[in-house]
Amino acid sequence: MTGVTEQTEYSADLAGVFVESVRNLGATVEVIKKSPETLCVSLQKATDGEQFVLLADPDFLEPELFDLFRQDKRVVSQPTKEQLSTIHAGVTDAFCGVASTGSVCVSVSKNLTSPASLLTRKHIAVVDAGTIVQRPRDVFSAGSFSMKNLNRSFSFITGPSATADMGPLVIGVHGPGELHIILLSGRDPHGV
Amino acid sequence: MGNINDYRIKPRQVADKAVQGALQEAIGLALDVETEALRHNTQTFNQNRYIAVQKIDDYEDLKQRARNIKEESIADLPDLIGTLTKTIEGRGGHVFLAKSRTEATGYITNVCLSHRARLVVKAKSITSEEIGLNHELENAGIEVAETDLAEFILQVSKEQPSHIVAPAIHRSRETISELFKRNFNTDLPLETGEELTRFARDILRKKFLSADIGITGANLIAADEGAILLVESEGNIRLTSQLPAVHIAVAGIEKIIRRTKDFGTFIELLAASGTGQSLTSYTSILEPPVELPVLNLNGRTDSKREFHLVLVDNGRMQMRDDEDLRETLFCIRCSACMNSCANFQAVGGHAFGGECYTGGIGGAWTLGTTGNIDKAKFAELCTGCSRCVPNCPVKIDIPGLNAVLKSRLMEHSGGPSFQQRFFSDFSKSADIAAMAPGLVNWISNLPPTRAIMEKVIHIDRRRKIPPFANRTLSKQYLQYRKADYPAQGGETTSSVVVFADVYTNFNNPGVGMSTVRVFDRFGIPVKLSRVFDDGRGAQSQGLLKDASKRAGELAPYLVDLIGGGDEIIVMEPSVLSMFRRDYRTLLSNEPQFERIAAHSFDPFEYLEKLTAEGHLEINRHLNITSWNTRHIFYHAHCQMKTIGAGNSAVDFFSRLRFTVDTSNVECCGMAGSFGYKKEYYGVSKRVGDDLIDQIKNALAADPAAVILASGTSCREQIRSELTVPVYHPMEFLEQLLA
Ligand code: SF4
């Protein structure tokens, strides 16, 4: 906590903890610079080999961020029922991340964020590093929760879906078996 | 060892413990075919919980906050129900307050019928089990698909849950695999966890995509925003609540709290206490009906989302008015009290549970929601070991509740049994026995006597009756002070009184004398108290009035000693736990309790305190180098761990450069009188297996290792299987004196 101004140092700290927590959950995470170009490259890599990709309109991030990726021919934004229940990969934004648990918070909104993060086998969540809070309970504190009236219904997503009901731990049950998180950083991501 | 899939009785047949013999049959079932899986699974949860709560840096504060929120919410419950109803109706949802189970199931069935539902997908909900929902829906011709994988297994096996969080915890992968192969006609491989999961998932995905209505429970409900909290790992709750246009949530009224932001206090506690995670995969906060457009993947043409909240009373308001049972309503159903319970680990919720509620807290829920105390008979499996107490996230005194249940069971059956009277009045029998201990010991272990004891007071004849000492502690002490070691002024300022509890006085005077002699040598002025029955025996049998009476008689004597500057040293951990925990309720005199609690110590706790304060230099009194091993295996008594005294002996001997290995079992299984009872002998032995195995391992590593245990009954349990010497740590310390 010395050197750089405390504010910046603190959030880099949070991002670092977040990244580690996500990895401990058996999910993957990358930190990239926040721009349509870098995001498009990352999303294309993360969805490599997928025939279709369900892209939910973002609830929180600027829609323009996804403009480049949306031009990818595999991207479906207005799915038919058939597509909704069969597409393997879903891309959504998340309105915040939680450092201590590696969770991302995904809205249940008028957009298809929730189904795209649930009906698919692979979920890719895009979250702004500036929204990371320390602990789950902080999402409910005045600063973050009431500020985003849009997101009154939401899910903390903490790793892929899992069960131990059949004996050993199995990853991938009713929800996705793979979770990839793209963390958008305003600064040089290598600093994180 | 049989196979659960073709065992002669099915769990459902023995679920209602009011039926004569059901509890015994259920214990048989559990020990025969469920115990392996149970033990492995509950102990894994238990260990993970200890790790998870350690990561919450303000765990104790957080628990207190959760407790406060629940206390306030239950106090304000009628008001909160009003606020909640207004909030949800204001958003276009529906709220139905069901007084009884039939009102609840009737309402839900009507909603389903009004939508011409043929298939309902359902997420795990104990409250729906409580009201018998599936049965009613099926009677109305509606198919119900349980979507939680454990519930799916139970739907196939036609069993009821054995655990409130992991309902199929009594089943191993092998028995599930066999069950599926018998029930489904498929060529798919069904061996590994992955294969079984994929198989069930594929069946359930089809159900999700064609279901008309989704029914969930709720972990908590917030009145201010009409928000519900749903905690899960599989994703089935999200699907159930969001795929069909109609979502019904059914929950007990006690789930309501005032503020959504207080969910923040509970979510980490719930995940850590339940499955030992920092958060489960999905923790959803919904304010239904949600804004998500109707997806109609089921082929319907529903135009808007519909939400029904069914709040179930079914006895809860009465529980709220019942001074003893009220605390039950704070329960957030995390299952920590099950996973941390040694008896539950051995027999699970089919034995230690009723038709839907399981474990230590299950008895109070069963009584509260059925009004039938006999159905709560399984509360007798709570030995009062208290290991659940520090692990309950809302700080419920679960053993205290079970003591109340035992007392009500007893009243209902027309007063205490011979057995209950025997254990409760042990001090009286001991007084008489002390006149001719040799004779009593001889007679009491004769086969005919054992047969009578087994018949009349149900003491299992396989248990050795702990012998009465030739000379009681008080006699030995008098003799010692007269002849061998007249009391002297000591080096330290404060003096101590060794409390002559009934067990130490009549059965284990050696332990008491060791303490006196060690303290003498350490220069700590020490006396012996009068012999007193502290009430533990009565309390453990559910004779609460007797226990209160005895506590009330003893308390002024102790307060007097303390007033005279003495500290109380207690040899028997269960007695120490009375002074530090149970007397709070038994005395109903807070200042008296606080005083006694603050001045009672385990001997090693006290020695550690003196050392820390710089009043004691133990090394110069001891000759340790002569001892033939540096290895100690120590089993801390269950209640001692709960009151925070479980580590003192470990710290003490570690400072003397012993390597101290500790058992990691929650309880030895003997638990005072429990292990002597014929009905529970098998459970007690099963629980003891873990401790015995650990001791065997320690002895395999070093055959000279010293085995120490603080509790009389723990030592008896160990001696019933092993022939090595087992000491109270004080007895061992005496041997180290220079
Ligand atoms: S009584 Fe406490 S520990 Fe047991 S399930 Fe309820 S909240 Fe959890």
Image: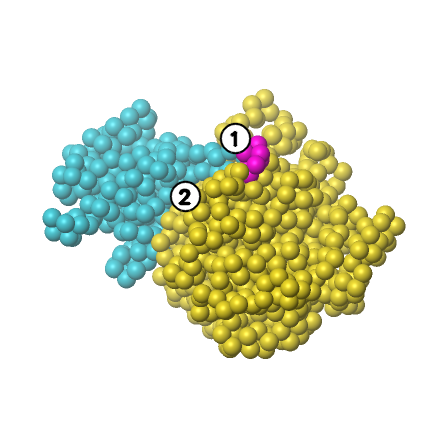
| Residue for point 44% across, 44% down | B657
| Residue for point 51% across, 71% down | B566
Q: Which residues are magenta?
A: B697-705
- Placement of the N terminus of chain B among the 4 image quadrants: top right
Left/right of residue B81 with respect to residue B40 in the rendered view: left
Q: How is the structure coloured here?
A: by chain
* SS state under label 2: loop
Q: Depth check: B517 or B191 in front?
A: B517
Residue A67 is covered by the magenta coloring: no
Q: Position of residue B185 (x, y in %)?
A: 63, 26
- Can residue B464 be seen from the camera position used here? yes
Q: Position of residue B482 (x, y in %)?
A: 64, 67
Question: On screen, B320 above or below B244?
Answer: below
- Can residue A68 be seen from the camera position used here? no
Which quadrant of the view contains residue B363? bottom right
Left/right of residue B378 with respect to residue B555 in the rendered view: right
- For disc 2, the neighbor class at 10 Å (few under 14, some 14 to 19, many from 20) is many
Q: Colour of chain B?
A: yellow
Q: Position of residue A74 (x, y in %)?
A: 28, 29
Q: Position of residue B357 (x, y in %)?
A: 61, 54
Query: What amino acid type should be assigned to the residue bearing mark 2?
Result: Ser
Query: What amino acid type should be assigned to the residue bearing mark 1?
Result: Gly
Q: Colour of chain A?
A: cyan
Which quadrant of the view contains residue B375? bottom right
Instruction: Name the disc covering residue B281, or none.
Output: 2
Dot 1 corresponds to which residue?
B193
Q: Depth check: B149 or A9 in front?
A: A9
